[in-house]
Amino acid sequence: MNGVEEKQSPLEGLKVLDFSTAFMGPDTTRTLAAFGAEVIKVESMHQHELNRVSAPYKDNIVGINRSYTFASVNTGKYSITLNLRHPRSAEVLTRLIDWGDVVVENFVSGSARKYGLDYEQLQRLKPGIIVLSFSAQGLTGPYSRHPGYGFNLLALCGFSHFTGWPDREAVAPIGSYTDLLCPWFALAAILSALDYRSRTGRGQHIEISQLEISPHFLLPAILDYIVNGRVQSRCGNRSPHAAPHGAYRCRGEDRWCAIAVHSEEEWQAFCKVLGYPPWTNDPRFATLRDRKNNEDELDRLVEAWTIYHSAEEVMAMMQASGIAAGVVQTIEDVVRDPQLRYRGHFQIVEHVEMDRYICQNVGFRFSESKVRWKRPTPCLGEHNEFVYTKLLGMSGEEFVELLNQGVFE
Amino acid sequence: MLQHYRVLDLTDEKGWMCGKILSELGADVIKIEKPGGDPGRNIGPFYNDNPAPERSLYWLAYNTNKRSITLNIETARGKDIFRQLVSRADFVVESFAPGYLDDLELGYFHLSQINPRVILTSITPFGQTGPYRDFKASDLVLMAMGGVMYVCGDEDRPPLRISVEQSYPLAGAEAAAASLIAHHSRILTGRGQWVDVSIQECIARELFMELGFWDAFKEIAVRAGPRRRRMASYQRDIWPCKDGHLGFRILGGALGAQTLRSLVEWMDNEGMAGSLKNIDFDLLDMSKVTRAQLEEWENELCRFFVQHTKEEIYRRAVEKQMLICPGYTPKELVEYEQLKERNFWTQLHYPEFGATVKQPEGFLRSSEVQCQIKRKAPLIGEHNEEIYLEELGISKRELHSLKEQGVI
């Protein structure tokens, strides 16, 4: 495709003001930036958002522009600082809002109003604006003012109940799990609201909470309670529809391969891969029901075979016979995974303080458009002058005056 | 918001969430099932524990708001009808193995000939390209290959997934967002495109923090039961209490100070604050706390928590704005006052069961548009007549013969 003019990014021209912090909001606007939107991250010079002060840091040296976690969710954005408590911030805010199409925020319930950033005030300033409010448990209701983060909301939302062994205490699922689920719902909502606005001229206020997204990820189990009165619980790696179904120890230090045998056909293929050891003819394992009834013994026998092979060998042998199997990959395996490499999942981004860092791609590819990072993760307030004077059209004098008064702190 | 758009949803359980989201945003989503029903309908649990394709609660969870028609796209007449449907559709969502639709001459290339504006969203375990594209997978395998299992579970036992399948609804949600980005591209160019979603890649994104530790120090994060890799060490996120467990993390800075101050005061009132009393909450920097010190604090906190029930602790947490949550079961979630007060649950009537089922109202609130569930999950081919007779103008006699031929 050499010589062909670069195609327009899908979201070219979209202007986003991001007042959000931590993961959920910033990851939402990161994807908008990846596909052409201009995203301005509005921060405080002195009260740093959670991820700017989260380890790990480049070279283990603490610094607000050195966090890998922050870089991971803010690549492609501008950063400006604005002191929302300063009496003159309102006039700056008015101009920012006039510039933007979409506002994303996750203030604790009530704070948005205090800063003049609630929907009523914003839409007066700019009719047609789209405001997306993220929250822990919603903006109304008896628990709306209770602060929450993914790492504790994951318990409230039922995920830790479903993570662990039936005979043991619950364990921590992945990261701040409920945070990770919300950005895609928010993106779908923002993009739909933009379409709606282009047809009707009308903006809207959209509310997304971790508490209300999460149940959609446990819904079959929740419906089992609602309809059948059964309270399901964590069951290790087991599945009612498959056996063997688990992570099996392989040769090497803490190496494992996940294997899932659902159908009778897959069971036959599985026995063949193992070379039909005598136990595969044991009537205790003849049908799925038999295998489920004797699953502890089955798992022991499977592992007595996998332990003599590397996890990669087990995966390759199983896959060659049409059985779902995959190495339980460490982060090192994931970074080196030939499939993820082939698809360009990991990209290297250069950065003034971090030198370079690994930036993850989104989970999808388009036939006609590509992720394009217009800039690396921003240093705090890096784009103050550019944004305030070039994008908002402040005169140099005005910019300096506000700067000297501490409005941009 | 998306009332003007039609989505043809050919997915099995790997992609159901995508159409569900688009339908809650207003799109007209038609689920196309093969005669006999979507294979995902065989996944339990089932209504009243009676296993049958039209009683799957897994199906009910992710197919509300959609209409259902049956169509065998492997037959010549079925292909014709499908092409006719595509000519008036805006989105097609599918989760067949890579190459399946191409072999039927219904891949993106073919569909774009019929309707250049159509967006085809394909959801597969590893994507349409690359050395693993034909690998077989399941939720367990994708959680393993995406890297999230390795960091989950007890040290002395195998790595773990979450017991309820997570990879499919996550990828479906990402697919909905991706489809709408492609839709904005279509607004600019007038043309649709092919959206290729890899479930493995959607999962891998959950590792952004572990990736940071790898990138920074070539450190491989491991599983540590209730603890996870944070700041300077592995810290507890899950804590036992009298009747279950809690979600809580010892945090430094202003964020942590408020919680710790109230919590330690409470512990002190009961004579259980121990060494936690010596912490200067305002200066606490978790990256400087030694492993031994952290363990001592954790033990003291555990001793305190197991004296109290999760509701007792949560009540106090809400009152004092402490960042502590109870670990809820599905039952407790359904009974949770906040969800009730917010009218999160709605009753959908299912004539086939002669009953209503309580289901979530929708994933978002909008000041402008009602985004609630309008329709129960459909029976197999429940809307065949609506679509085939009324919309496509197929005669009753032909519909009957198509049924006999196994096309519909």
Image: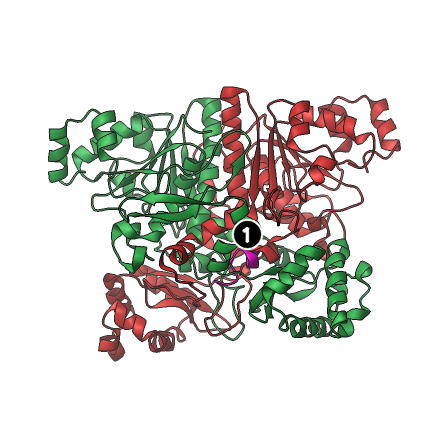
Chain colours: A red, B green
Q: Quadrant of residue B43?
A: bottom left
Taking B351 as reference, is B370 above or below it?
Answer: above
Q: Which residues are magenta?
A: A154-162
Q: Amino acid at mark 1?
A: Glu
| SS state under label 1 | helix
- Quarter of the image that includes the C terminus of chain B: top left
The x and y percentages for residue B278 are 81, 70
The answer to whether one can see residue B138 in this image is yes
Please state which of residues A330 and B92 is positioned toward the viewer in this rendering: B92
Q: How many other residues sit within 10 Å of disc 1, few (<14), some (14-19) or many (≥20)?
A: some
Q: Quadrant of residue B318?
A: bottom right
The residue carrying mark 1 is B337
Chain for numbered disc 1: B
The x and y percentages for residue A361 are 53, 44
Please state which of residues B48 and B97 is positioned toward the viewer in this rendering: B48
Q: Residue at x 77, y 29 (%)?
A: A90
Please state which of residues A172 and A277 is positioned toward the viewer in this rendering: A172
Magenta segment's dominant SS is: loop
